[in-house]
Amino acid sequence: MTEKNRSTAAFLAMLLGWLGAHKFYLGRPVAGVLYLLFCWSGIPGLVGLVEGIFYLVQSDSEFNRKYAPRLAYDTPRYLGDPIDTLRRLEALRQEGLISEEEFESKRRQLLDRIG
């Protein structure tokens, strides 16, 4: 999963939302195809405009949590409970959202910060 830019997603949603460009960009191809199938009705254009506005008012952490979950842990969020952070990292590893190497790297960073 690659890094997704919130403003790029908003730009695509507002200008090409009627084609579902933002859905393809965000890694949601099924939704993108649905937008393409109904582009003749104008509804995807209106929905895309609203979604673009939502993307702009979301914080980066909210956006990353929803559309790039591994990036939600790239920022130093280790100020809270370290056990909880380790559990969340383990869950991401088990779901296949981060590799074993990424998990070990984040685990070592966390232990270095608290130790």
Image: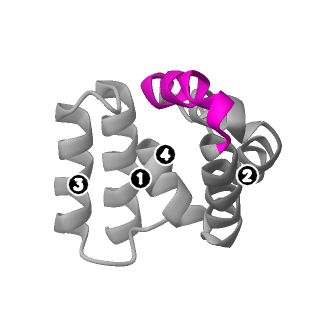
Note whether 98 is above or below 69 in the view shown: above
Spatial separation of the CA atoms under disc 1 and disc 3 = 14 Å
Q: Is residue 109 magenta?
A: no
Q: Which of marks 4 and 3 precedes in the sequence?
A: 4
On residue 10, the disc is 2
**Foreground mark, 3 or 2?**
2
Q: Are marks 4 and 1 in contact (CB under 8 Å)?
A: no
Q: Judge whether residue 78 can be spotted in this image.
A: yes
Circle nearer the viewer, 1 or 3: 3
Q: Are marks 2 and 4 in contact (CB under 8 Å)?
A: no
Image coords of residue 38 (percent x, y): 56, 29
Q: Residue 30: horizontal and vertical position, in percent?
A: 43, 24
Residue type of the residue flagged with mark 4: Tyr
Marks 3 and 2, the one that precedes in the sequence: 2
Residue identifier under label 4: 67
Labels 3 & 2 near each other (Cβ < 8 A): no
For disc 3, the marked residue is 88
Q: Position of residue 35 (x, y in %)?
A: 56, 31
| Closer to us: 77 or 105 | 77
First along the sequence among labels 4 and 1 = 4
Q: The C terminus appears in which quarter of the rendering?
A: bottom left
Secondary structure of residue under mark 2: helix
- Quote the CA–CA distance across marks 3 and 4: 17 Å
Q: Which residue is mark 1?
A: 109
What is the chief secondary structure element of the magenta stretch? helix
At horizontal 47% and vertical 31% (from top left) the residue drawn is 31
Q: Quadrant of residue 102?
A: top left
